[in-house]
Each structure stands twice: as structure tokens, then as C-alpha cells.
Image (spheres, grey):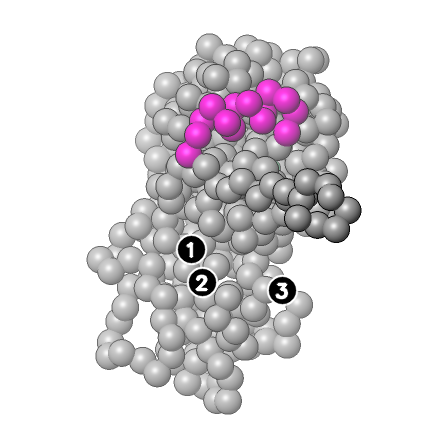
């Protein structure tokens, strides 16, 4: 009993932010909140595309520059017409082959699609995620969801609900847990020009996979000047710890005495080293390596190393996409210049 004779104030304990309740996530999305959602690529920060305020909130939470558009997530090919017009025939071929899955396609946007989603472009990026929880969520909400990756702008993408919580503990009410992301790197982004398929961002769907379905594609190199797809920025997906790439991380590390170094390698080779090492795939499988990539980067980044050394992957298939992410993770203001210690 307190001396003023008032009933004691009960401060409600904050309910857990991570949940597996699709119903709860749908409720929050329907009332205009931002909810973190699982996908097979990485976790996303989602809003109902028809809630303008929620769309703005995504940019605030992520501290994402306004020029960086969001991907619209739909649940079925038939929903494409809700957001896109003049859909080329090749897009349907790709959609039938890769959707639901980690392929984002850029179309002319329908006038009703918010400019907040498209960063004032007249195009919209769309995909069907291959995750049963999020597909059910989209159906429950009854509208497409716009979502970028659920990380602060430029940082390592999240592949688990815990990664999202670590980034945005106090900024989100709901993080929908759908388990670890099965693919682990972002979607491949393609567009269409004069009947040709243009690849703007390498991702889980490799160039070889695309070409086996639609023939030769054109790959655009990333640029900082006028990124058509801002996922093409040179510096992105970066840990806070300086990182460099090397064909032989162990040798590179042994040339850098006095540094506390962590290694990120594709396959464990040779004897156990003196360095803490994250191995991405025990049996040399690109898909497994992609799945583990960001979790290993998050872990290494939390361990207080002076420098991380990542092994360059063979330049084929999804290995190419992993090299793309590693190269951009290495672009950071650092005293270590990758070029002069490449061996
Ligand atoms: P994130 O999921 O964080 O990789 O962000 C979504 C990415 O999709 C952006 O960074 C862009 O690269 C790409 N994107 C989204 N909408 C468009 C668009 N209309 N045109 C080109 N790229 C887009
Ligand atoms: Mg991102």
C-alpha cells in the first residue's frame, strides 16, 4: 500500500516483439504499422502498400534515403495487375518459372502505386516470396506488402528474427518469426528493355538459371552515380568491422601481424588455423554458403576483431552473387586497402 492510498501503478510488461502469430502481424499491418516479415531471401520491413504513413515509417526506421525504392510483395501472379501495367511476355515466362521465389522484376507502375514505394520512378519492383508464412500473411492482410530488407541502410541484411531484433529492438512492435531464411541473400533484380532481360542486381537466382529460361541476358555493373536499382550501390551489406577479400585468407592474415583477425571462408582448407574461422559450407555448396553468409558476417562483426578477411568465391553461379555482396561489404572507409594486400 503506498502512502497516498492510490492503487499501485502497474507498468505493463512489454509483450514479446518476436512472434509466430500471423494473425497478430496481419492486425498490425492492417492498422498501418510496420512489421518485420520472414522471406526466403532475407527478412523484410513490411507495410501495406495502401498505407502511406506506414510506407514513410519504413524509411524512418531504416534511415533509408528517399531515392531507394521498395519491393512490392504479392501472393499470386494474378495480383501483378494490382500494381503493374504493360507486362512483357518474357516476364510471365520468368514468373511461371521462378515465382514464388527470389526473383524481383521491374515493371511500369500502375498510377495508383504510391511514389513513396517507387521513389518517384514510373517503375515498380515486384516479386512473390517463397515463404508459406508471408504468403499467408499477404492473403490475410488482403493487400500487397512493400518491403525492403530489415536492416539499417547499408548494413548486413538479416536472415533471422533475432538479427532484426538486434537492429530495431525499440522501433518495432512485431517481428514475425519464420525461421532462418532459406536462401540467405537478396533476390535477383531484372528489368526489361526492348524485349531483352536486364539484370540489375545479382542474387539467389543465378545468371545461368535465368539464361536457361529466357536465353542471353544483359548484366549491368553496379554504379554509385545513378543507380537504377540502388541495391547496386558499391558500398552496401557492410559489417562495422573493416573487411577485405582474398583468394587465400589464411596467407593474407599471416602477412598482417599484430592484428586481431577473423576469417570468413567458403570451405575449410588445410589444418586448423590460428584464426577464428567461419566456414560457409562444409562440402563446397554455393547455396549452403549463401544461406550462411549473413549469419556468419553478423557473428564475426559482434566478436570485436580489428579486421575480417573473406575468401573470394569461384566466379560462377550463385558464387558470383556472393562475391558481389562480399565486394560491397568490403567497400568501407578503412586503412586497409584491399588492392594492395590481395594475394
Ligand atoms: P532491398 O530489399 O533493401 O534490397 O531494397 C529493395 C531494392 O529493390 C532496392 O534497393 C532497389 O535496388 C530495388 N528496387 C525497388 N524498386 C525498384 C524500381 N522501381 N526500380 C529499380 N529498382 C528497384
Ligand atoms: Mg537491403
Residue 37 rendering spot, x and y as whole percentages: 49, 34
Residue 243 rendering spot, x and y as whole percentages: 53, 68
Q: Name the residue under label 1.
A: 295
Depicted 302 relative to depicted 226: above or below: below
Q: CA separation, marks 2 and 1?
A: 6 Å
Secondary element at tag 3? loop
- Whether residue 216 can be seen here: no
* Nearer the observer, 110 or 143: 143
- Whether residue 243 can be seen here: yes
Residue visible at 73% across and 44% down in the picture = 5
Q: Do the residues labelled 2 and 1 touch (CB within 8 Å)?
A: yes
Q: Which mark is on residue 332?
A: 3
| Left or right of residue 52, residue 140 in this image | left
N-terminal of the two: label 3 or label 2? Answer: 2
Secondary element at tag 2? helix
The reply to whether the magenta stretch includes residue 14 is no
Q: Do the residues labelled 3 and 1 touch (CB within 8 Å)?
A: no
Q: CA separation, marks 3 and 1?
A: 20 Å
Depicted 149 relative to depicted 47: above or below: below
Residue visible at 44% across and 73% down in the picture = 262
| Left or right of residue 90, residue 194 in this image | right
Q: Name the residue under label 2.
A: 299
Magenta stretch: give its range: 20-33
Amino acid at each position: 500500500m503506498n502512502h497516498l492510498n492510490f492503487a499501485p501503478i502497474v507498468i505493463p510488461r512489454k509483450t514479446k516483439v518476436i512472434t509466430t502469430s500471423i494473425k497478430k502481424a496481419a492486425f498490425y499491418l492492417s492498422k498501418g504499422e510496420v512489421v518485420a516479415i520472414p522471406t526466403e531471401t532475407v527478412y523484410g520491413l513490411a507495410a501495406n502498400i495502401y498505407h502511406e504513413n506506414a510506407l514513410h515509417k519504413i524509411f524512418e526506421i531504416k534511415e533509408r534515403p528517399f531515392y531507394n525504392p521498395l519491393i512490392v510483395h504479392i501472393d499470386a501472379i494474378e495480383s501483378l495487375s494490382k500494381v503493374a501495367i504493360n507486362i512483357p511476355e518474357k516476364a510471365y515466362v520468368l514468373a511461371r518459372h521462378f515465382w514464388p521465389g527470389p526473383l524481383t522484376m521491374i515493371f511500369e507502375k500502375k498510377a495508383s502505386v504510391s511514389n513513396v514505394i517507387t521513389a518517384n520512378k514510373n517503375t515498380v519492383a515486384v516479386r512473390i516470396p517463397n515463404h508459406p508464412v508471408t504468403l499467408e500473411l499477404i492473403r490475410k492482410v488482403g493487400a500487397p506488402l512493400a518491403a525492403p530488407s530489415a536492416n539499417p541502410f547499408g548494413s548486413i541484411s538479416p536472415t533471422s528474427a533475432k538479427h532484426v531484433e538486434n537492429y530495431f529492438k525499440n522501433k518495432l512492435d512485431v517481428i514475425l518469426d519464420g525461421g532462418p531464411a532459406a536462401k540467405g541473400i537478396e533476390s535477383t533484380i531484372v528489368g526489361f528493355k526492348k524485349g531483352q532481360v536486364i539484370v540489375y542486381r545479382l542474387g539467389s537466382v543465378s545468371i545461368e538459371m535465368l539464361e536457361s529460361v529466357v536465353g542471353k541476358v544483359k548484366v549491368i555493373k553496379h554504379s554509385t552515380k545513378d543507380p537504377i536499382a540502388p541495391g547496386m550501390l558499391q558500398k552496401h551489406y557492410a559489417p562495422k568491422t573493416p573487411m577485405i577479400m582474398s583468394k587465400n585468407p589464411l596467407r593474407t592474415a599471416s602477412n598482417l601481424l599484430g592484428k586481431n583477425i577473423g576469417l570468413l571462408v567458403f570451405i575449410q582448407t588445410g589444418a586448423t588455423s590460428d584464426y577464428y574461422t567461419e566456414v560457409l559450407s562444409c562440402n563446397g555448396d554455393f547455396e549452403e554458403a549463401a544461406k550462411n553468409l549473413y549469419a556468419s558476417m553478423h557473428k564475426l562483426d559482434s566478436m570485436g576483431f580489428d579486421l575480417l578477411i573473406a575468401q573470394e568465391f569461384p566466379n560462377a553461379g550463385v558464387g558470383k552473387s556472393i562475391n558481389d555482396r562480399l565486394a560491397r561489404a568490403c567497400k568501407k572507409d578503412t586503412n586497409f586497402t584491399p588492392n594492395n594486400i590481395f594475394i
